[in-house]
Amino acid sequence: MNTLAPACFLLVVNVGLLWLLMAAPLGCRTITFRRQFPLDPETLWQAVHPLGSLSGWNPSVLSSEPVGDDRREIRQSFRYPDRRGKPIVRMLALEEGEPAAPNRRFHTRIVDDSALDHSYWASFSETRAVASLPDGAELTVEVTDRYRGLAMFLFRYFALRRELGQLRQWVETGKAKAGGLIEHPLTQIASAIASTLILWPFFGLTRMGLLMSTLLTVVIVLHEFGHMLAYRAFGHRSARMIFVPLLGGLAIGGRPYNSLFEVATCALMGPGMSAFLVPITIAVFGLARAGDLPRILVEPSILLLLILGAFNLLNLLPIYRFDGGQVLRQVFPSRRMLTVGSFGVTVLILGIGWRIGLPAPALEAGLAVFTLMSLMGRARVKPREALVPMSSPERLMAGFGLYAAIAIHGYAIVYACDQLFT
């Protein structure tokens, strides 16, 4: 069974996609939407203006009020919680164009945010204009920002599209619902099935290939479920998982992080959850091979062990966006110690590759890929206030947890390869 070629190809594809999503320099971009509504222009203006009499339709906004008599600054409170569970508050600078009724426009910039540092909003601006039509009014929305990586651009695009969809829902029914189609459980189930089918050709269009792509999807779900459990333990009441075909899953917390220990634990619990399954899977394989369990479980269990170990071990690499990189950055506060810790993790993982018989050129290529990936996406979303630092016991706990997860998943790969290829 040759799984090295599809695994390497998947790795190369994912490296390219990760660079595109997280590090590609897109520059300053403007997202523009135009929507027509069966409303008179003044009614639509009162709905989309932050100080309009009908602005309360938006389920994401709790309140919007002027600061001062000139109405050039607006304080908005959102239903999304900050790190302490309180509503996020933003200050908007408002500039209104010269009124030419029934056509009107306004321009806003974010000058303060209770959750994020101002640098996050330095290039952000938004313009909304209402124009009269014979049978209603047209709304034009333009959002401009500087992007590094396609992920945030796509997030803004779909967030704005959702808001306009909620506005249309309010116009048609008198009420707009929070949430959207992407988070719906049926959408996520469909995405998981689609991901399985997309991955199938990478492993060969055979029964074995379908089994491996299915097991990989299961491993991804278990990994993200571990992240979600950690989020819930730290009080993220609305933690959820978004399944992205080909790239895997993404667990999203219900609020920003409050402490460095929280960041490290939530990152570590993805592979940590899977680590608990390693001895169980080995036991199932042994019992099935001995005849104490149905022999039909022999093949799926050993393949599950291999995929479980390989997927989580890759996630433990000391790369900025991966779980291993997230943990290491919290455990080691200085750049020198972070470099030493990252080198140690890399050597351990490459040692596992050498143990299972990967050729030297493959290990060298892997090292080159890991180095390139470690340079991706250094820019971070900076919180307004520094996170609560780690105590020494917390640092020790997270560090040993990381190396324990590497050891367990490394053993899973070595055990599975010994059974499959010797």
Image: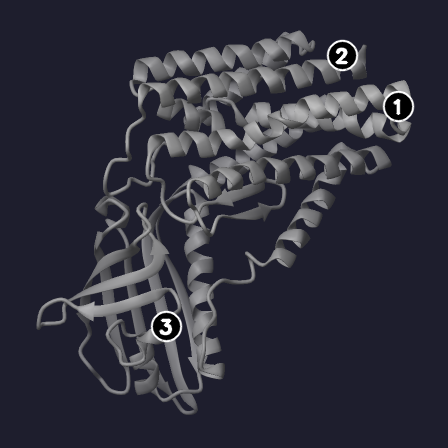
Q: Badge 3: few (under 14), some or many (20 or more) residues near its Cα, within 10 Å?
A: some
Task: Determine the secondary structure under disc 3.
Answer: strand
Q: CA distance from mark 3 to mark 2?
A: 62 Å
Q: Between residues 76 and 230, which one lies in front from this camera angle?
A: 230
Precedes in sequence: disc 2 or disc 1: 1
Q: Which residue is mark 2?
A: 418
**Residues at circles 3 and 2 in contact by the CB criterion of under 8 Å:** no
Q: Residue at x 29, y 18 (%)?
A: 334
Residue type for callout 3: Thr
Compared to residue 216, the image places residue 153 above or below, namely below
Q: Residue at x 59, y 13 (%)?
A: 363
Q: Nearer the viewer, mark 3 or mark 2?
A: 2
Q: Residue at x 58, y 31 (%)?
A: 273
Report x, y in % for residue 161.
46, 64
Report x, y in % for residue 368.
51, 18
Task: Determine the secondary structure under disc 1.
Answer: loop
Q: Which residue is mark 3?
A: 140
Q: Nearer the viewer, mark 3 or mark 1?
A: 1
Q: Which mark is residue 292?
A: 1
Q: Between residues 282 and 59, which one lies in front from this camera angle?
A: 282
Precedes in sequence: disc 3 or disc 1: 3
The quarter of the displayed image where residue 93 is located: bottom left
Residue type for callout 2: Asp
Q: In this view of the protein, can residue 284 be seen by the observer?
A: yes
Residue type for callout 1: Asp
Q: How is the image coloured?
A: one colour
Compared to residue 167, the image places residue 403 above or below, namely above
Q: CA distance from mark 3 to mark 1?
A: 67 Å
